Amino acid sequence: MNTPAVPASRTRPRTRGRRSATLTALLAAMVVATLGTAPAAPAGTTRPTATTCPGHLEEKADCYTGRDAGGAYYTMAVPDHWNGSLVVHAHGGPDFSYDDSSTTEDLERWAVMVDEGHAWVGSSYRRGGYGVRMAAADTENVRRLFVRHFGRPDRTYLHGQSWGGNVAAKVTEAYGGERGAYDGVLLTNGFLAGGSRGYDTRVDLRVVYQHYCRNLPRPTEAQYPLWQGLPANSTMTPDEVHSRLQECTGIDSAPADRTARQQRDLDDILAVTRIPEHALATNMQYAAFLLQDIAHKRLDGRNPFSNRGVRYDGSHDDKALNAGVARFSADPTARRDLSYDSDLTGRIALPVLTLHAIDDPQVFVEHEAAYRATVEAADRSENLVQTFTRESEHSALSNAEYANSLAALDTWARTGNKPTPRSIARACGAFDTAHGGGCFYDPAFRPAPFASQVRPRPGGLHWPAMSAAREQAWSRIDGVGIAP
């Protein structure tokens, strides 16, 4: 197929194509990789191909897709009435597989940013599975690709959602100092505690679940350390893991249809892990498959997690729980590699605005407390504003709030006038009129410390989890981190 030249002007004739509607699987076959770090790839050798924009954007923007030199798919959108700014999107997950529809689906999900006049670009990342620095490098690479084909935007904003918040925060620290690269950062429902501490809640779920349910594995099946999530050679599917969760807790059944044992085990698991009932099934999938990916695919079978010294409480019998729950200690090199890959130093040199649902069931709002403590420890608080909403969704917040947040970030970056949570909340009404979705800000809210939600390990009360000095020292170790 001949690839049309990308127009240089901001008002262009339209081109149309065919868009794949295949959904990205949340949990699928994972890709094997080796230990290492991820430099930003070359800008790429393929030109973007014109395609049909998703949804209503077909009538107001030109879209392009392609695959970069590292193998990552990307989608770009340039609105007919482009305001000159670019949003670079870092998606959540981590997804365990991707295809050429992945980034187009992200564009459709955050189409409000294009509606507001911003160009948009997102990368699928070069492979599925865990790897924050890898994803950060691919995110930076897709920005460079956009610049190569469309020219440097007047302003460039970075947006990270969920795990993509961790990725975008890493981009901010690794590439934000490059002159003209980024002007501001928006992190929404971001996973901002980093991997070495942020996944402790799923480690706890894995061991607490097995203490009560004893069916993953069953006593008649081969036993394995629970920090693995699942064994490397496991053939279990997400449906089979969910079936065992249902068997133990009756999670899919009406309360009246559960046995007394199912209800008690469910109550204990929820109380001890502090995970809401409607989010338990999703968290259980990650506790099985994400831990498996990290331990086996990314860390060569080494264990980065520990629950030594943790006292679990909230059950009907805490003494029995703490006496019977599986315990393990981390391999220091595995923990170092996970920390180097994903933990944050807080050294931000750009305006960073966060937006987080107070009742987010997947990435607890206390991640924001961890990030604030990290940024404060780096003496960069002047670059951070955090906002919170009375919402209980994780994957998508109000369109009005996304548009409002970008506008506040743009004003901050252009004028140097730092907004406040209250001023941002006051401005939202006009965006609700334009885009809908409502405005649910709570300007007075402040999250409790991270340790109030996720039980700290010994030494885990102080932030940052990785200082800038430690990051620099670790960077000199050959093969440190997680491979791209």
Image (tube, rainbow, N blue to C red):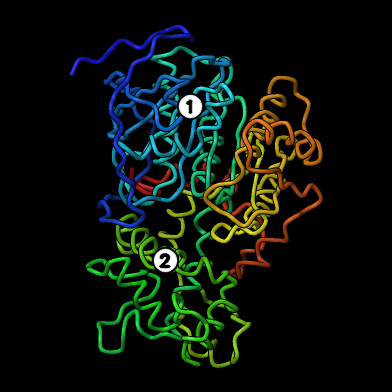
- From the image, state whether disc 2 or disc 1 is nearer to you: 1
Tell me which residue sits at (51%, 36%) in the image. Answer: 110
**Residue 148, how many percent across, how many down?**
40, 15
Tally of marks: 2
> Does residue 13 lie above or below 394 as drawn?
above
> What is the three-letter code of the residue carrying label 2?
Asp
Q: Secondary structure at mark 2?
A: loop
Q: Secondary structure at mark 1?
A: strand
What residue occupies the far left of the structure in this picture? 1
- Checking the image for residue 234, the label placed there is none
- Checking the image for residue 120, the label placed there is 1
**Residue 97, how many percent across, how many down?**
30, 48
Relative depth, front residue between 210 and 303: 210
**Residue 10, how many percent across, how many down?**
49, 10
User: Mark 2 to mark 1: distance in Å?
Assistant: 41 Å
Quadrant of the snapshot with the N terminus:
top left
Tell me which residue sits at (47%, 86%) in the image. Answer: 258
Location of residue 63 (image quadrant): top left
Between disc 2 and disc 1, whose residue precedes? 1
- Checking the image for residue 331, the label placed there is 2
Tell me which residue sits at (63%, 52%) in the image. Answer: 464
Q: For label 2, count other residues whose C-alpha is less than 10 Å away and answer few (under 14), some (14-19) or many (20+).
A: few
> What is the three-letter code of the residue carrying label 1?
Trp
